[in-house]
Amino acid sequence: MEKSVDAIMPGLCARVVVEEGDKVSIGQEVAVINCMKTEISVAANFGGRVKRIISKEWDELQVGDPMVILETDE
Amino acid sequence: MVKRLLIANRGEIVTRIIRTCKKMGIATVVVYSEADANMPYVKTADEAVLIGPANPMQSYLNIDAIINAARKTGAHAVHPGYGFLSERGAFAEAVEAAGITWVGPPPQVLKSISSKSHCRKIANSLNVPVIPGTLTIVENPAAVIEFGNSNGWPVFLKLDKGGGGKGIERVGGANEAKKVFERATRIGELAFGSGACYLETVVDSPRHIEVQFLADNFGNCVCLGERECSVQRRHQKIIEEAPSVVVTPDERRELFERTVRIISKIGYRGAGTLEYLRSREGKYFFMEINARLQVEHPVTEFLTGIDIVKQQLAIASGEALDLAQSGVHANGHAIEARIYAEDPETFVPSPGTIAALTFPAEDPKIRIDHALKAGNSVPPYYDPLLAKVIAWGDDRADAVNRLKQALSDFHVEGVKTTIALNIKILGSPEFQSGNIDTNFIDTSLSKAHPGF
């Protein structure tokens, strides 16, 4: 099943730290948001394999915007 | 002298620069993003130009848009403020190429000092002590391990082009070297365009002492005293004061002498700051050059009566400094609190909308630098600095008490702010006794206030 890892703060995408095909475990950092120049780590709250990267550096983000799509384990 | 100045920045520093321009009879042009259309200075400046969307990459970091705004409005000079493009050699170059005066150090100086290890090499060659570490770039994790094993753990791995408190990684031991090295170089490449790193040993209980200077085109360099900025969170300053309680007159003379030596060597022109770390044993180590007007410059202005922005404009206009070192006098004590839009306990940013605003009563011994207005938004795309409150006093206790009172009378509703934290710092016995270092918030304050 496809599930997205979403922005937890508004701001700008600082970077996505995984690549398509990477295996991601629960709690692993997948992206970083720059909110008011503070870096906020975005972790996956489920495990899976990276299917698609949505966000790129400098993208504007609102809370809930999908950043990375994972194919989940279950 | 400059007749029409474009200010390539946003927030409180725009208001600050306009204040000096009005006094000097200089017309002002401000630029703003779509997120900042309601900023008070968009109305009070002589001209305002919309330069792009909220995203800073398309507005405040957009060199072409800013140069076009300067051309369109006939601005004679560009003041970059701090942050954004202020220390970007390519921006300074583009401004000068457009036939516009750049208020800052020459582009080629900005380019060469953007490398911190280059600055360390220069300081070292002038017999100015630098934080013990490498003078060259470390190429691989093995070099980190070798350095740590022979100098002791932990060590700091720092990005050569890092800044703003970013790109400083602590390496606890040999087992962490590979992971931290790979993360640092990756972040460096993504955020600063260079993954190059150098190493520093950890200075025990360091205090942050910096020297403000002015240098003109005629070889004159005058130091306007030091500022102590040891109270920091996440390697970013929150309280700054002058004079420092630990710097002796002999040490101050020595720091001034070192500063002039470095500044003269690199051919710097304009206002700037040299940052030093002071170890527990009282040794001073050169850290880095801040090639811009600094956030905390009002502390020095309150202490010396010198308008640093006015001096910047005069230097950029090609004038010789109208003051000598013997003409710089520190009077009393000045202290600044930065108010950030952040949770005062977790430091998590707090963007939002300013619902209501109450300022402290006007007082000639209190200065408030801000660009706040009730109903305006605090966007998530920019720096969290909301306002700076600066107090002057006959002595340190007097200044601290006045600042504490002003902060208690300052209310911002709608976003979380660090006002409560500022008040706690100023009221803590450790701070009042002057017993501070850069770990103050994490150690002393946490002990004194279990809630932190």
Image: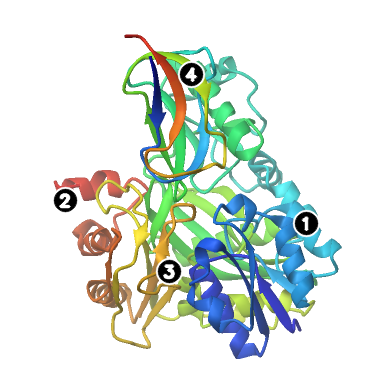
Mark 1, chain letter? B
Mark before the other along the chain sequence, 1 or 3: 1
B123 vs B336, nearest the viewer: B336
Which residue type does callout 3 highlight? Ala
Residue occupied by mark 2: B448
Callout 2 amino acid: Ala
Q: Is residue B324 visible?
A: no
For marks 4 and 2, the one nearer the N-term is 4
Callout 3: chain: B
Q: Which residue lies under the disc numbered 1? A: B107
Residue identified by numbered label 3: B242
Mark in front: 4 vs 2: 4
Residue extending farthest to the left is B450
**Distance from the alpha carbon under mark 4 to that under mark 2:** 35 Å
The residue that disc 4 covers is B179
N-terminal of the pair, mark 2 or mark 1, is 1
Q: Residues within 10 Å of mark 2 (few under 14, many from 20)?
A: some
